[in-house]
Image (tube, grey):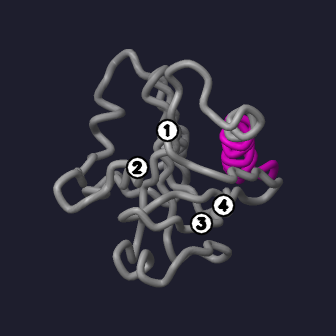
Amino acid sequence: MTDYIGYEALTQAAMRGVVREALRQVASESVPPGDHHFYITFRSKAPGVKMADHLVQRFPDEMTIVVQHQFWDLEVHDGHFEIVLKFNGVPQHISIPFAAMTRFVDPAVNFGVSFEGIDGAGDDEVVDPAFEDSSTQTSEPEASVEADPESTVVNIDAFRRK
């Protein structure tokens, strides 16, 4: 059966809206409330992503940033957000369109969402710029978030027709 309404696209847009509103709450306070913090994974070469060339070279496919303690100038717009994070002590401005996001996780409340285009495989390197050096980078597989039976991870693929 053909989906003339486009429920998948509507659901994706709605979940990106949830992320946008969560970021807006953080931007208004300049700090995440309570224990909230975000792991945001995005395609580093997606249209509209703006970040230093050396970061794109280091993370040619996907990059995961942590928004928790040390970030500056978070600005949330309708189609993208901008943030300044330090990498090896050097502030870097990053602009990320919401359409470039592949995952959003708030481990404080076991909430996460995966967006279209995720194949479920891979060891994405999580970059917590506040603590970044060669000895503190870790690999954070997606399964660590989805394996928790108490978590509320919404994977759009689960609703697709095969």
Q: CA distance from mark 2 to mark 1?
A: 7 Å
Q: Residue furthest top?
A: 150
Please give the range of residues in magenta: 1-22
Of the residues under marks 2 and 3, which one precedes in the sequence? Answer: 3
Q: Nearer the viewer, mark 2 or mark 3?
A: 2
Judging depth in this view, the residue of 159 and 124 nearest the camera is: 124
Residue marked by disc 4: 99
User: Gap in Å between the C-alphas at discs 2 and 3?
Assistant: 15 Å
* Number of on-image labels: 4
* Residue 76 sits above or below residue 55 on the image: above
Q: Nearer the viewer, mark 1 or mark 3?
A: 1
| 128 sits to left or right of 72 | left
Q: Nearer the viewer, residue 133 or 109?
A: 133
- x then y, percent, for residue 137: 24, 54
Image point 49% across, 71% down: which residue?
44
Callout 1: few (<14), some (14-19), or many (20+) C-alpha neighbours within 10 Å? few
- Residue positioned 59% across, 66% down in the render: 94
Question: Which residue matches tag 3?
Answer: 94
Please say whether residue 156 is one of the residues in the magenta stretch: no
Q: Which residue is mark 1?
A: 69
Q: Residues within 10 Å of mark 3 (few under 14, many from 20)?
A: some
The residues bearing labels 4 and 1 have C-alpha atoms spaced at a distance of 25 Å
Q: Amino acid at mark 4?
A: Ala
